[in-house]
Image (cartoon, rainbow, N blue to C red):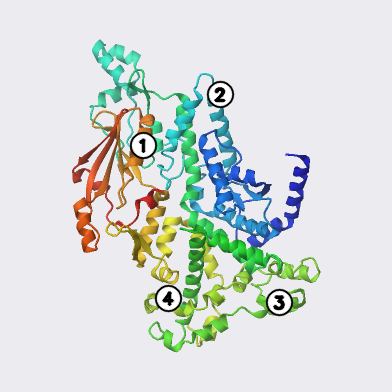
Amino acid sequence: MSNADRFRKQAIATDLEEPVREARNLAQKLGLEPYPVNYWIVDYDEMNELIAYGGFQSRYPHWRWGMAYDRQQKQGQYGGGKAFEIVNNDNPAHAFLQESNTLADQKAVITHVEAHSDFFANNEWFGLFTSDRADESAVDAAAMLERHARAIGEYMQDPEIDRAAVEKWIDHCLSLEDNIDQHRVFRRRHDADGSKPEIDEDLAAKLDELGLSEEVRGEVFDDEWLEALEDDDGSSTFPETPQKDVLSFVREHGKQYDAESERAVEMEPWQRDVLDMMRAEAYYFAAQKMTKVMNEGWAAYWESTMMAGEAFAGDDEFVNYADHMAKVLASPGLNPYSLGLELWQYVENTTNRREVLERLLRVEGVSWRNLTDVVDFDEVLARLEVPPDLDRITAESLDALEELPDEWVDREALEAARAGEIDVDRYPWKVLTYEGLARRHYSLVKRQHRGFLSRVSQNELERIGRYLFDDARYASVEEALADVEFTAGWDRMFDVRESHNDVTFLDEFLTQEFITENDYFTYEYSRASGQFHVSSTDAADVKKKLLLQFTNFGKPTIAVYDGNYDNANELLLGHQYNGVVLDLGKARETLKRVFELWGRPVNLLTIVKEVDEHDVEVAKRRNREPEPEERGKLLRYDGTRVTTEDVPWEAVEHLAADDVDYDTKPEEWLA
């Protein structure tokens, strides 16, 4: 990089000092609690490198990064997409902004980043990676990844170790990077449930052949090893319960296959070390995969609140910002930004609606049975409108703020604004409190949500009314609305942000009302017609299909069922079947990878759906779908070839889920 370029970047960064500072101030006023964020300006190529590296500047040497960089670059050149920023989960977080962004774009991504950093800092699923440390907030992912990069680089440069062998070993480890137990606290060392001490079978056999006395055996071999040998009846199975952390299991019990001796031998220290590193990185990135919809929707919500709601985008930047946001929300396919934003707005609206309805149901003469008949919702919305003096704050209107409740106005900031220390025309939010901002942005009176209050169903009214504590009564609607908590929606959002992941988020808030209002539906492939068609708009069907795409990162759930399968030290994996069949071609290739981490034959039990071709032809003539038959299969790789055999249903019945979606496309599940 030339000095001219370096100075130019510094000048661009200086232009952003005020937006960075004020975005942080506004985020905190709105109730966000983000990690500190360091902002960096990078060029197009650097941005593509960072995206390929998952948001970090240093990663271990491997071909996958070059492939990711090439894909990202082609997407920008030919796909019409543009990466505006990338931020990593770290404390402090590091955000990288592309220098070609307009000022409006930079402001948008800065507000977006502040919300992401808040999510990183406060969502419990991100805390699983650090919760076993003395300082749970001490995320230092960049340092961890740099240590891994340095260690693996040293292994590759070691003259005693073949560089290609290291890269190939990483490939094997990565085949299981999503086969961890992401719902548990991460620990570097994880003992498998029901594990048994390692016993070298060849040495045990030789010991018996020698016929050594107990005295000699006791002097040469330690008690733990001998007890394990005596207790080993040659038929033990482990773990006692299925273990989802397959990476941990092969790390603790796996070997490597030695082609010369044609047997399993102990892994080299560097191999176990690489396994440890790959497992740690898998756990670190797990929370991001588990909360993609929530996290992107959260960032989009607060970005919009700041940029549009609080006019953080200036008058000359607003059209540019609107175009920026429209492109983000209009991306094709399952768009986490759009779905997440809509769901967060739904959380806010339903909470605010319930708060208002609970007040109205306490009015004398009003019950859940007659509320919609006796209450004028237009009048209610009129009374909930944002007070004009709160909605339009200028340097000339500061005196009007004196009449507003103390909980809405930051009196100290108001005096500073009067003294000219705060540019209130540019940053009106500085004279308000969290409660005042919640009142100023109350969702039910926004133009796009004005019909939400009156759209309440009779079932919802009954549910609220039947379990309403009669701790307050009001003489009139006006009196009831005076007690409405205008922070209820935001408070609920902060609670949800703390405890949920995408699966629980969708499960709780993807209701029939939401699906109907936002026109969600399911579709499936018809074997009879050879085309895709809409199959359902029912909430249960839509929810099932979406949940399957987010459960276990949208990948098949595989667990270890036996580390001594068939009493031959073979590995038995089980596919926890939910109605979506495995791609058997990919499964076979994965077994070959796992064999390298186990050193002995590897087996996989699964359930498939098979359709007789005759049934397909009959179904086509009758314009209906053929009925598939579910069957058990056992795949086995012995180091030479993969075999597949039918197994009785009793052998796989324990793998089948009770409630499954039979219409989800395998390619969606495996993507």
Which amino acid lies under the numbered mark 2 shown in the image of this protein?
Answer: Gln
Residue underneath mark 4: 469
For marks 2 and 4, give the CA distance. Answer: 70 Å
**First of labels 1, 4 by sequence position:** 4
Which amino acid lies under the numbered mark 3 shown in the image of this protein?
Answer: Leu
For marks 3 and 2, give the CA distance. Answer: 68 Å
For marks 4 and 3, give the CA distance. Answer: 35 Å
Q: Position of residue 655 (x, y in %)?
A: 27, 47
> Which disc, if any, is residue 589?
1
Which amino acid lies under the numbered mark 1 shown in the image of this protein?
Answer: Glu
Q: Position of residue 156 (x, y in %)?
A: 53, 26
The crowd level at tag 4 (other Cα within 10 Å; few <14, some 14-19, many 20+) is: few
The crowd level at tag 3 (other Cα within 10 Å; few <14, some 14-19, many 20+) is: some
For marks 1 and 4, give the CA distance. Answer: 60 Å
**First of labels 2, 4 by sequence position:** 2
Residue underneath mark 2: 157
